[in-house]
């Protein structure tokens, strides 16, 4: 997961590397995902999410469709 | 202890405590000393945690490579939080370090296209600047095929 200055820089990088575009999100969306995913990782009772629980986190943040399907 | 998951949870918690406090991952011997376990017991715990995708070990070793969002190896995603320097393996993990350590900090990286320096700042729950773009190259179902490349 890389951070680009703009859509134009992402497109240029994809062309240069002959790569297909994957999925994009805004910095605000990435921060929301980081908080949801890692916010409680330092707590002693933290447990790894099941694939179903992880999928719910994605869906709550609007990340749906084939790209975000875990199973 | 008869319940193997109990020491694994305690080992995991201590890994994160040490990583946060020291900016580097602990060795198995350090965890063993702190918990009164043998190094072999802790190495077995490390392997179970790695098998469960809770941590990532450097290939062929019992050295912790990643306890996500922390990365033991320097990366292009440098994080400053709680007056300490860390690395995340990607932008998700870099922001994850900040989320995990109180929600205030900065990420320093460079645009993969042009090499320009970029800085993301998280203050009072807001992240900026907003015009940067995050790109995910690999679909979610394949992230653990090669986590080092993800």
Image (cartoon, helix red, strand yellow):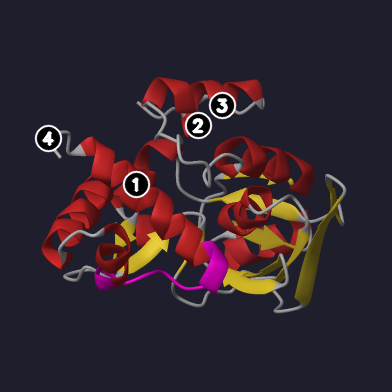
Residue at the image position 77 percent from the left and 77 percent from the top: B117
Residue A43 makes an appearance in the image: yes
State the CA–CA distance, disc 3 to disc 4: 33 Å
Q: Name the mark nearer the viewer: 2 or 3.
A: 3
Query: Mark 3 belongs to which subunit?
Result: A
Tell me if residue B150 can be seen.
no
Mark 2 crowdedness (10 Å alpha carbons): few <14, some 14-19, many ≥20: some
Mark linked to residue A57: 3
Chain bearing tag 2 is A
Crowding at dot 4, Cα within 10 Å, few <14 / some 14-19 / many 20+, comes out as: few
Q: Are marks 3 and 1 on the same chain?
A: no
Closer to the eye: label 1 or 2: 1
Which label is found at residue B10? 1
Whole-number angstrom distance, CA of label 4 to CA of label 1: 14 Å
Is B77 on the left-hand or right-hand side of B26? right
Q: Residue at x 16, y 70 (%)?
A: B60
Mark 2 or mark 3: whose residue is earlier in sequence: 3
Q: Nearer the viewer, residue B39 or A39?
A: B39
First in sequence, mark 4 or 1: give its number: 4
- Tell me the number on the disc at residue A68: 2
Figure quadrant of the N terminus of chain B: top left
Label 3 Cα neighbours within 10 Å, binned few <14 / some 14-19 / many ≥20:
some
In the image, residue A35 sits, relative to residue B22, either above or below, namely: above
C-alpha distance separating marks 3 and 1: 25 Å
The residue indicated by pointer 4 is: B2
Instruction: Tell me residue B59's x, y (percent).
Output: 22, 68
Give the class, few, some or many, for how many residues have Cα within 10 Å of label 1's Cα (few <14, many ≥20). some
From the top left corner, tell me how far across and down residue B123 is, in percent: 86, 54
Magenta highlight range: B20-29
Determine the image quadrant of residue B77.
Answer: bottom right
> x and y percent of residue A64 in the render?
57, 24
Task: Tell me the SS state at disc 1.
Answer: helix
């Amino acid at each position: 997961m890389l951070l680009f200055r703009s859509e134009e820089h992402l497109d240029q990088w994809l062309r240069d590397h002959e790569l297909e575009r994957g999925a994009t999100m805004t910095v605000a969306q990435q921060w929301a995902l980081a908080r949801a995913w890692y916010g409680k990782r330092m707590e002693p009772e933290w447990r790894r999410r099941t694939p179903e629980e992880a999928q719910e986190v994605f869906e709550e943040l609007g990340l749906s469709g084939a790209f975000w399907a875990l199973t | 202890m008869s319940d193997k998951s109990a020491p694994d949870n305690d080992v995991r918690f201590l890994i994160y405590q040490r990583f946060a406090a020291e900016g580097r991952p602990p060795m198995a011997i350090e965890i063993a000393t702190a918990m009164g376990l043998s190094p072999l017991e802790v190495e077995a715990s490390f392997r179970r945690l790695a098998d469960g995708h809770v941590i990532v070990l450097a290939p062929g070793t019992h050295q912790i490579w990643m306890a996500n969002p922390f990365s033991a190896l320097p990366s292009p995603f440098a994080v400053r939080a709680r007056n300490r320097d860390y690395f995340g393996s990607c932008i998700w993990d870099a922001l994850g370090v900040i989320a995990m350590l109180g929600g205030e900090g900065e990420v320093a990286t460079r645009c993969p296209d042009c090499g320009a320096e970029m800085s993301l700042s998280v203050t009072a729950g807001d992240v900026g600047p907003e015009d940067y773009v995050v790109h995910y190259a690999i679909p979610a179902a394949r992230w653990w095929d090669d986590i080092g490349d993800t």
